[in-house]
Image (tube, rainbow, N blue to C red):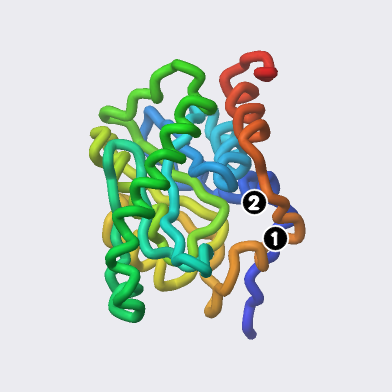
Amino acid sequence: MTVRPRIFADRMAAGIALGRELQRRLLPAPLIVLGLPRGGVPVAYEVARILEAPLDVMLVRKIGLPGQPELAMGAVASGGIVVHEVGIENAFPDLALAFDTLVAQQRAELERRERIYRRGSSPLELTGKTAILVDDGVATGSTMLAALRAARKARAGSIVAAAPVASSEAARLLQAEADATVILETPPALFAIGQWYRDFAQLDDAEVCRLLDLSRGAAPHA
C-alpha cells in the first residue's frame, strides 16, 4: 500500500511534528536550534520549545536565477560562506558573469537582517554544541548546505539538518555533509515547498523578531 506524504497545517504544526521526531533521536546535549529566516524560524521556534533548547537564527540567503528566483544558483551564509550551483550555470552559461553581483546583493541583505534580528547582540555560541539547523522545506539544498558549512566554521560539535519536507536529491546532498539529517517527508516529486502546507503565508521581519523575542523571554520589540 502506498503511503501518501502528509500535508502540514502550517509551519507551527510542522515544527511540532519535527520537534517530536528530534526529541526521539536523543541528540547529545547541549543543543541549540537555528532557524533559517524567514520561513524556517516558526518551525524552529516549535522545535526549540519542545527540546527546551535556545533558539537563534542562521543567516543565509538563496541566490535565485534571474527571472526564476525560486530556482537556486547557490546561496550565501554568515561567515563568508558561498555555495555555488555550477550545474545551473552549465545549463545557462551567460549567468556565470552575474553570479558575483548576485552574491554581493545577497550579502548586503544578510547584513540588513543581521541588524534587524540581532539588534546589536552577538550570535549564540556554537562551539562544541549540537547545532540543529531548521528550515520549512528543502528543495535544492543550497541554502541548507550553506547553513551547514557556516555552523561547521563556527565549530559546532555536531550538526543536524532538519526540515518537515525535502526533495530526495536535497536529502542525499545533506546526508553527505551533516552529521545527521531529520526529514519527515521526502516526496517523489517536490516542485514547491508550499505544496506541502495548507497555510504557507509569507512572513515578514517583524514576525521573525517576535518569535525570537518570545523564545528569549523578552518583550516583543516594537
**Quarter placement of the C terminus:** top right
At label 2, which amino acid type do we have? Ala
**Mark 2 highlights which residue?**
14
The residues bearing labels 1 and 2 have C-alpha atoms spaced at a distance of 9 Å
Alpha-carbon neighbours of circle 1 within 10 Å: few (<14), some, or many (≥20)? some
Instruction: Report if residue 64 is visible in the image.
Output: yes
Is residue 44 toward the left or the right of residue 102 in the image?
right
Residue 141 location in percent, x, y? 41, 61
The foreground one among 24 and 189 is 189
Of label 1 and label 2, which has the lower sequence position?
A: 2
Is residue 8 toward the left or the right of residue 58 in the image?
right
Q: Residue at x 30, y 77 (%)?
A: 93
Residue 139 location in percent, x, y? 49, 65
**Mark 1 highlights which residue?**
197
Q: Residue at x 32, y 74 (%)?
A: 94
Residue 179 location in percent, x, y? 30, 50
Question: Image quarter for residue 151?
Answer: top left
Q: Are marks 1 and 2 in contact (CB under 8 Å)?
A: yes
**Quarter placement of the N terminus:** bottom right
| Mark 2 element type | helix
Residue 172 location in percent, x, y? 36, 68
